[in-house]
Structures are given as C-alpha cells and as structure tokens.
Amino acid sequence: MLYVYLSHPFRIMNEKSPLVSVVIPTYNRENLVGRAIKSVLSQTFEDFELIVVDDASLDNTEEVIKRFQDSRIKYVQHQKNMGAPATRNTGIRMAKGAYIGLLDDDDEWLPTKLDKQVNRFKESSGRTGVVYSGFEVRDQNGRIVQTTFPALRGNLYMRLLKRNMIGGSSMIKSECFEKVGLFDRSLKSCQDWDMWLRISEYYEFDFVPEILSTIHLHGDQISSKYSSMIPGRTRMIQKHMDEFRKHPDILVIHLKRMGKLHCINGTWKEAVYWFRRALVVNPFEIIKIVAWCVLELPKIKMFSRERHFKRYRIEEG
C-alpha cells in the first residue's frame, strides 16, 4: 500500500466536485506547512478542496495538519519517502477540481489569489492551460528582497525552451495533466520547468499582473542545494536534448549554464566538460566564457557560501 488516508478529523467531500483543487506536498516541515495551509483557508474564493500530501515525514507534520478543523482538507500520507514530484503527483491524482493549484509547503498565497486566477481563466482564451501571477521573495527576517511581475502570455513554448519564467504557484487546468502526464519523478530539480515546457506544446499561458504569492527563503530550498540543482538540470537537458539541438542558440545557453554551475560548485572537471560542449556548438562563445570566469566568477564565489555534492557520472546527452 502506497499511502494511508487519515479520515479523522477530516471529512472527504462527496457532494459536487469543487472547482479548484489545491495540492500541498510536504516533508518534515512541521514549522512551515501550517502557514501554507492557513493561506489557503484564508482565500476569498471558497469553492476548493485542499489536498495535503505528507511524504512520510519524520517530524510532527501530521499533528500540525490535524489541528486544522476544516472539511475541505484531505490529508494523505505516503508510507515511504518518494520525493517531491511523486508527492505532487499523488495529490493531482486525488484532485476533483477543474483547476489545480500547486503550493509548496514553505510558501504562502495572498487571500485573493484563487479568486483572481479563476476569473482570469474565465476571461481568457479556451486554449489557456495555465494562469500564473507575480510573486515576492522574503528573507528570513521577513524583508522583501525581490518582486517579480509576469509579462508573457500566449504561446510560450520557444521562450520556455530558454528558461523557466513561470511561477511555481500557478493554476493549471486539470486536463493539462491528462494531456501531458504528471511531474517527472527522475528530476531532482527543474520539475516545474519541465512541466510548463510540456504543457506549452499544447496550451497557451495567461497571467494576473499582480503579486499573489510569497516565497520565503530559509536556506533549505532545492534552489539553494547544488546537490539537487545540478543533477536535475543535467537530466532536464538530456531529456529535451533532441529539441534543444534544433535551436543551437538555445542549446549553447544551457551548456554554458551547466559549466557555470559547476564552476560555482567547484567541480572543475565537469565545468570544463560542459564548456567544451558549448564551444562545439559555437566556438565564438569562448570570449564570453573566459570573460565570465575572469570577471564574474570570483565575485560569485566570494559572496556565496560553499556548496558541494558527491560527484556523479557524466552521461552523454
């Protein structure tokens, strides 16, 4: 048996299906997941179910979630740790809503997020599969250190080939997952980017031009762990290599980025490997690579804490 449902104190709704299903995957975040849940329960839009998927936490996550007395909450618990993509997928499989909202357990939503995204879906083209929004980033002292506003809508496939510009707390039509499948469990990072890229082959994107979610920095995000970031991005490039090769200017961007990540991480052999691959695509990139190594890398290394991970075999992609 893969997971266990805890029926008390929650009542699984068996009336009409909610319009929105919210999925929160969580693992060992007893001190954070409560804030995420509160932000969903505080939404001005109320026609939703909240599915919290516990990836076999070893702390008091279960007790924290049980404190919330709301019949819209469904709690499911993996019997063994399966990773973030699999945890999201469990929630998506359970979802009954026409739209699915994904919220990380360390982030939170502003009260009008669901309301405004649902309205945006109603106003936008029937080809729209994802509605995203702006977000703010706060440091451990609660200070805003970054704000990002969306600017791109429509067919974003070519832009998503270059980079991920879609916020993680997006709202997705449930039919998108039926069309392109669930999150890729083989990716240690870049799961969102991979999903948006696959969806963009068939659907358009739209946005609400406001800040509707908050990302909280605490030092334990995947984006701060090169042990997850580098293997995940490596796998992402390998997975979509056939498409990247059709666009050499985009391919060289990703090859150089991998080289830079390895430079910052101190894995120099791997850095040289990726830079060489970039130069095979475009030899003139040598000027940019050298300039970055001489001018930018020392500053990055000076102001970034060291990050290390076990070396892994480089696979040809």
Image (cartoon, grey):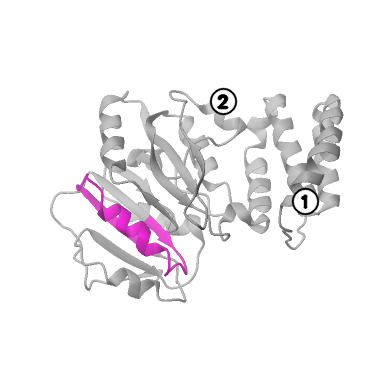
Which label sits in the foreground, 2 or 1? 1
Q: Quadrant of the C terminus?
A: top right
Give coordinates of residue 36: x percent, y percent.
Answer: 37, 57
Task: Say which quarter of the image contains residue 132.
Answer: top left
What residue type is disc 1 on? Met
Find numbered disc 1 in the image and state the secondary structure of the residue it sits on: helix
Q: Which residues are magenta?
A: 24-52
Q: Which mark is residue 302?
A: 1
Residue in the image at 84% along x and 31% along y: 279
In the rendered view, would you say 300 is above or below 243? below
Mark 2 sits on what residue? 158
- Looking at the picture, how far across and down is residue 150, in whole percent? 45, 31
Q: Quadrant of the N terminus?
A: bottom left
Name the residue located 45 percent from the left edge and 76 percent from the top edge. Answer: 59
Instruction: Answer whether residue 297 is visible to the viewer in this image.
Output: yes
- What's under tag 2, amino acid-wise? Met
